[in-house]
Amino acid sequence: MSHSLLSDRTARIPFAVLGIFLLLGSSMTCAFILHLEATQTTPAAELLDLNSVSRLTHAAEADIATALNRAGAQALARIGREPIIISSLGSAQDMLTWRLRHALTQNITSYLLAQYTDDQYTDGTYTLNICLSNDTLTIDPDTITFEERTLDLHRQTLPLLGPRPLVSYPSYLIVHLPLTFRVSALSDPDITLRREQATITTLLTSRYLLLEHLTDEFQTTLSGPASPLWAFTTTFANLYSTLRAWKHYVTGAPANIVDNRHLALIANAGILLEQGLVFHSVDPISIITLLSQTGHALNQDDAPLLQYFNQERTPNGSTYNTRNLTQGSANIDAGDNLTDPIETGPLLSFSDIIADILYNITSVTLEFTKPPNLVEYEEVAYTNETSDQIAAMISIRHEQGWTLSNLTKQYILNETTNHAIQSLAASVYRDSMSMVVSNRTVIYTQTNTPGPPWEEGDIGPWHVCLCQPGAKCSTIPLKGDIIPGSSLYQEHYNVTYERTHCWWQDIDVNLSGNHTVIRIWDNRTDTMIESVSLDTLLQWAASFGGTHDDVTDILYENDTLQDPNLQETLDTYRGQHPDSQPEKQQLITTLGNTGATGLQTEIPGLIPQWVQTTSWEAFEDIWDNLSQLTLNHGCNATQYPYPLTLLDHTIANLSALFTAHIQENLAYDRYHPGQRFCSVGMKAVFHARAWLLDSINTSLINTAATLHAALTQILEAAIPASSGYTADSIEETITHTIDALRDKFTIPYGTPMILANPQSPTWTESVLLAVNQIPHVLDPFQPISSGQEQLWTLKLRNRCIFGPTGRPILPLTPVTPWILTMNLWCIDVEGEFLRFEVDDANNEAVYNPLIGHSPQPYVREACVITNGSTILGENTRLHFAYSTISLAVVPAFGMMCGDLQPNWANDATPGYS
Amino acid sequence: MPPPRGQLAVSLLYDTLLFAAMVSLSAVLLIPALVSPLSSDASIEKHRELQVDDVLHTLLVSRPDSFSYTFCGSLLDAAAGRLGVDTTSPGLYTAVRLWILDNEPHHESYEALIAEDLVSQLRIPDGSDGSVRLNLLTTDFDDALRDALHQFFTPLFQGRYAYNVSAQWHPITGLRFGGELFLGPPPPPLTSHVATQQISVPLTPAVRIGNTTIILSQYALARYFTALNLTGNRSIPEVASIRMVLSDYQHQTPPYDSRPFAEAAVVRNLSHLLDGFLIDGIHDTSNATVFPGIANATLDALLARLNNAAQQKNTTLYESVGDLVRAVDHTLSELNASTTTPLASLMLGHFNQTLDSLLNTTFPSLPEAIAACKDWVLNQTTTTVHILFRPMLEAFVTDLFDAGDCVLAFQTMLGSWLLDRLAIQSAYVTLTIWPVHP
């Protein structure tokens, strides 16, 4: 059987035929799709990336911004080497803008011509050119604008001695440069595809502004009253003068308490500390030179600077030992060991205060020594002029080569105090007695009566006609029973009274026949005898200060203590009131006055001699006790170099000590062991103690107030009104800064500061600066050469206001010594740096092909800045000037307190004019 | 009525089975069209091209968070050690070291850092297709920059792409003189994607010719050559000769009426002119320099700081080596009065030693070493230029002779041809990425 695929008489198209078409269709479709994909994909892949124009523009903007920054950094580096401080053509800020603008214009114009012309800037497809006018590129400098970017600078600092810990400073400049781009295809560069005006904005990465502001801040820190350097010098100088003055007070050396050699070191140390606090960096050579020169001033062997350079430092900087200049210099100048302690003792002591109460000075003996072994004495009678005499004597002797080596005082007993003791004892040795009519009885009455018919008429008053004393006897109670009101003595009297007693009767009398009634009188005398008892009573005894009757066995002599205890006062009383005394007679003879008292009399007792001596012994006991009390460890001149502060703390400390030891010094139980005082004398001694303590307290308060007022007055008088500071500001400065400087301080360097953008928490960077100053240490004794100029970089002057002996504080009288000796030095400081340079050591923004990057510098030195023949302005040196005072207060006498060299009134370094 | 019984047609069963097989076959035929990778590959390729452009652009405008490199630390230690400074003690030296050793250009973009690194290398040809880094004081700059770039790319590509960065600054195109920076493995030839961007370098060499100072840029040189009338200036012997040869050839005047002879003469003169332009200067008949030579001027610009520093006068010395070096020198010289510029002197001595080792000669002073180095570089450059530019020169001359008016062609083409050899202020950064297949 033959088969035919197509010949189907049923007219059915076989599926296989459809399948063949399906195969053909699929093949064609597949071929078409593959062809289509192949032909379409290539053009799609080659489609122009129109974003590339934008990308090219952005790349150009970034590139120009980079060039702008680089040009800006180079320009700022040049400007930083010669900043204009005093401008000839406008403000210094205007000149900065002008110079930067012109430098940028010049630099960026060259750059744009080199890079963005002649189709040089291209991505291979497009080219970008800067639009030129007449084939030249002109950038109007005025179109370049700047804005400052202010950042917060965080620093470690010290109150009053350094800058504020957080200061906002303009740190960076942002520059805007408007340009016009023209983009064209590289294949047809004459046709402009896009013309675009763009403003290139970039941050100039140089921190010129920060350096400029920090340097200005450093300048401010150094100069003027109440500046940080002033605060440093004031505190350090006061610590220095105080300790050296104490050394001088004790030993007579150093002769020159405030020495310019040391002031120079203090000023340089202050400059470096301020430098460290402002920049967190200092010139390292300055530190080691300062350490070396300090050692030299202390007679230490000269060590090479290298040795100091290699010394270990603290993590934050180098430590400067304050004590080297304060205590150490005093010891060295006195010929002692560097580290010997200086006894700064209390400014005031109970010993002195009590001594002033107990004794008076009659004269002062000054001991002078002269090498090799000569000793002479001068005695000065103590008068109002003693201080001047001593000053003149010391000065004259000093000029002759004599040195005051000792000063002694001659004392006598203070008679005022002696009288006070006597007066007090006399007050205690006293009692009071009175008499009372204790009984009155009629023992006899006689009335003469005529009998009837007599009628009783008028009766006259009784009147004494006879007073006959009777028995008298002591009624003093037994020991211990005597109390106020006790009857000590009883007297009896018989008093006879008489009176007229009239009688009458009427009788009829015939007179001449007239009967007349007449009255007749018979006046008779009545008699009455009364027995009267009169007692002597004790009113009070040994009264003092509101206390009385608190003595054991009063009115009985204490044999043990040999204290009469007012025993004799009864007899004295009786002796003072004899029977004949009218007042007593009146008491006796006044009818009906039973219970009446009178004759109240205070009777001084006999004061035994031992009361006076024992009172003095008690005083000396108190003196010893209080003198042995020591002030708080820190209450001395080292702790409080400012005299007023020291005085206040001393007084407060003494008062506290005094209050704490009052009971102990009263020794109440010693005199009053039980219910009563042992004797009147003992009470007197006790109250003498109380009096002395009260006197000490009063003296303390009065002394404090008077001293404070006197010191303040002297200080205010010494500080010129135009100085810019006051006694209060000095006190505040020293109080707040002394803790940081007392023993040592750290000059920070090499530590980074934090610079942060308050608006952008992520923008935080560090600032590490390097400082280079010339000279490394300002020297007041050696000028440095600068061209034709001889420059004294440091000029110092100190004037000892109160001369070699200082000024006694508190009125000097022939009987009262002065309490303190004070002196005051006016210190004037001027200085300048030949060259001062700060480099931004951790933001090397200035490109240098040789070393990669170099830092932004900022230099202050004297030079004139020109642009061609035009003077733009001048750079100036950093300079400073300030005045302050230094004080010293020591106790009275000793070796006094003052500079002894001839030029004490004006001790200036050679460059000071 | 029963269905008719077909006797000729295939059975329905066979027909259906055959149809089904054909449908399947059709589907198979369509598969290539449906799963073709052409479009996706093209899309991916395009994406990667754009991506590499974007990444490069992003890199160049980005700023590293913190960037620092160490200035030649061993040198400072050596300078200080010579003076007796205990360089291991935590004393003042630590601070001084910190000041100078860590160079930290804050806020600078990668573009600026790359450009500055390239210029600071002072790389010169070593005579064997390589180059030598003359400035060894900043070698850590290269390493730190590589690290910074690595830190930029690593989180960006997350291991999915490998990358290669090359930055090159060659003031004279094709000559390995200038600076180079490479990072990453060499890219595969076919599967990588490349982006290149031109960046500017911080160098603006300028030459002084007579009373005129010209910045060595295409713009300034083009105008200078126009003003000089370079191609018409018969006072320049080479130009005069070329013009004469071309004119003779154009007018079929012997001996240059034959093209090969004329071409050889033009190539010879043009080679001299190119040498003068690129290397040792163009001189007129009175032997006056009308142009000092690009390599000469660029070398002078690069070595100017060294030259200035070598004068050992404080002003020029510290202008060249920077303010911090001065500060450190002041510090160190105070410690030992025997030398006033210990660090700067040591730096210069270091360069001297480098040049000594490079040239296998000992020089008594740095200025002499610099002069010898310059001569050596110029010699190397001359050799390289001759080898490198000879084919281009011949091609240019052929083009000249192919032009109708070859004198006119010479006048119009020479300037741009010469300037095309230069890229003094432009460096090129190339980023190549390729996918990494696990």
Image: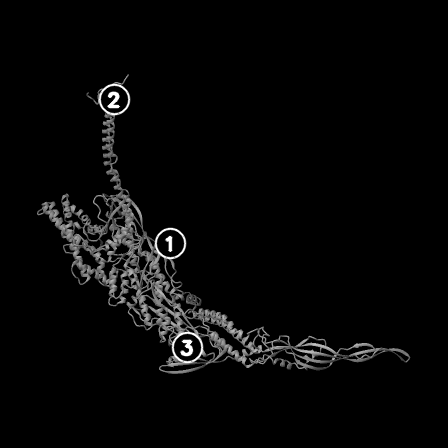
Q: Residue furthest left?
A: B255
Element at label 2: loop
Quadrant assignment for the N terminus of chain A: top left
User: Residue A895: which disc?
Assistant: 3
Residue that mark 1 sits on: A758
Residue A280, position in %: x, y? 34, 61
- Could you say which quadrant of the image residue A314 lies in? bottom left
Whole-percent x and y of residue A866? 29, 60
Query: For the residue marked with disc 1, what is the amino acid?
Result: Pro
Task: Please tell me how crowded label 1 is: few (under 14), some (14-19), or many (20+) other residues with Cα within 10 Å.
Answer: few
Front of the two marks 1 and 2: 2
Is residue A869 visible in the rendered image? The answer is no
Q: Are marks 1 and 3 on the same chain?
A: yes
Q: Nearer the viewer, mark 1 or mark 3?
A: 3
State the residue in front, A24 or B5: B5
The answer to whether any part of residue B390 appears in the image is: yes
Q: In percent of the image, x 30 and y 71: which residue is there?
A: A302
**Residues under labels 1 and 2: Cα distance?**
90 Å
Q: Specify the quadrant of the image occupied by residue A786.
A: bottom left
Q: Quadrant of the C terminus of chain A?
A: bottom left
Res. A12 mark: 2
Look at the numbered discs 1 and 3 and tell me whether their residues touch, using CB distance below 8 Å: no
What's the distance in space between the residues labelled 1 and 3, CA to CA? 60 Å
Amino acid type, mark 2:
Arg
Chain ID, mark 3 = A
